[in-house]
Amino acid sequence: MGDRILHLLLAFVLSICLSIGLSKAMATDGHLTASASSEYNWNLPEWTPKPVVPENNPMTAEKVELGRHLFYEPRLSITGKYSCASCHKQSLAFTDGKQVALGSTNESHTRNSMGLGNVAYNSVLTWANPLITSLENQALIPIFGEHPIEMGMVGQEQQMIQWLQNDPNYRQMFNQAFTDEQPVNVDNLTKAIASFQRSLVSFRSPYDRYRYQGETNAISAAAKRGERLFNSERTECFHCHSGINFSDSAKHENMAFTQIAFHNTGLYNIDGNGSYPPQNIGIKEITQEPKDMGRFKAPSLRNIALTAPYMHDGSVATLSEAIAHYQAGGRTITQGEWAGVGSTSPYKSGFIKGFTITPAETADLIAFLQSLTDEDFITNPAYSDPNLPTVK
């Protein structure tokens, strides 16, 4: 485990160093003009606050469009067949439907692909790394990380920049997006991808129209009952899935402070002392604190009906199973190497106490969760693969 952590940290630090160094050294050609100053239109409903954007990477339409092309670009992988979109498909709210992700070399990962909807509102990124708070830095991990391999481009930095430089379309888009004398570089590549990711906003679900825009009939009576259950002290759901993005790790322009939280939900208790499978021990992998065993971020619930399977390891197949897990106050696994009674974990969150719920109430809760599906988000052409034919 110690070696794995060391490899992770080394890969991350190396990647950051590469991004900084390559930004100055690897671009090989100048450019004619730059116009990276256009004001960005978030296209948010009036009630929605804007995300917080880093001062060194302001949003522009040009950067977002470049980032969209790079997000769907398979040549950013070692096999030339794998892109960011391979694990983050728009039709599935930018998840992949798999229990755990597969990298470009078919290496099976240990964690489920997280959705990218409203990722700009996340105060901390990935399932269990409190150190990753910047989309720009996070983008380096899938491209250059080795444990596990995602895009697999470590050691290919010079070749990657070279072909981007030689591609007239990309050269033009980099020139339009950035004012640097030599704009095609790793630093700007990650800034563009981060900008596109920040543009992926989802606030137009039926629930949004009901709750924030006064459309009283936008959701069903069952969904309204489910909302009351969700926000009740009986189920406790709202404590961890709070605010406009249904997560307690959040930030936006109207928040006085940044929320960051990780929770142990009693998913495992292998040895009776709270242990999780060794490849997935939560933020304890970073902090080395015993109390952090099995603590993971509560993801946003927006578009949750599209993002199965659930939990950090994709081990819960359906919304009904997820509700049953919380109803029981933890999961009991009766046999196999991960057998144990999660409800008795000493590290379990105090919010996971278990509750009684009828089948009809479970159906209401699911109806509420389904009302969070934003059809505009999963069909918006601005978020789609720019290489696909335009539908007329």
Image: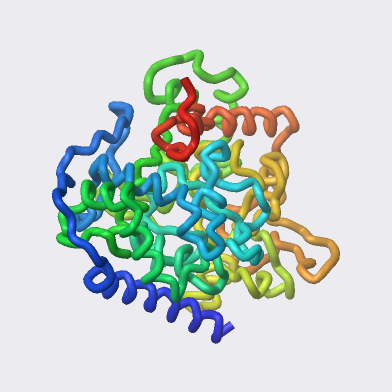
| Number of numbered labels in the structure image | 0
Residue nearest the viewer, comparing 76 with 304: 76
Residue 58 is at least partly visible in this image: no
**Residue 263 % position (x, y):** 53, 60
Q: Is residue 59 above or below residue 216?
A: below
Q: On the picture, is 284 further left or further right than 101?
A: left
Residue nearest the viewer, comparing 312 with 368: 312
Residue ranking furthest to the right? 335
Residue 65 is at least partly visible in this image: yes
Q: On the picture, is 315 further left or further right than 312?
A: right
Q: Is residue 219 above or below residue 267?
A: above
**Residue 284 % position (x, y):** 53, 74
Instruction: Kindly indicate the quadrant of the structure image that contains residue 118.
Output: top left
**Residue 17 % position (x, y):** 32, 76
Which color mode does the image show?
rainbow
Residue ranking furthest to the bottom? 3
Residue sitting at x 15%, y 51%: 32
Residue sitting at x 15%, y 49%: 34
Residue nearest the viewer, comparing 121 with 152: 152
Quadrant of image for the N terminus: bottom right
Q: Is residue 69 above or below residue 221?
A: below
Residue nearest the viewer, comparing 343 with 68: 68
Q: Is residue 69 above or below residue 275?
A: above
**Residue 88 % position (x, y):** 53, 48
Residue sitting at x 43%, y 39%: 386
Q: On the picture, is 197 further left or further right than 83?
A: left
Instruction: Kindly indicate the quadrant of the structure image that contains residue 344.
Output: bottom right
Q: On the picture, is 212 further left or further right than 308?
A: left
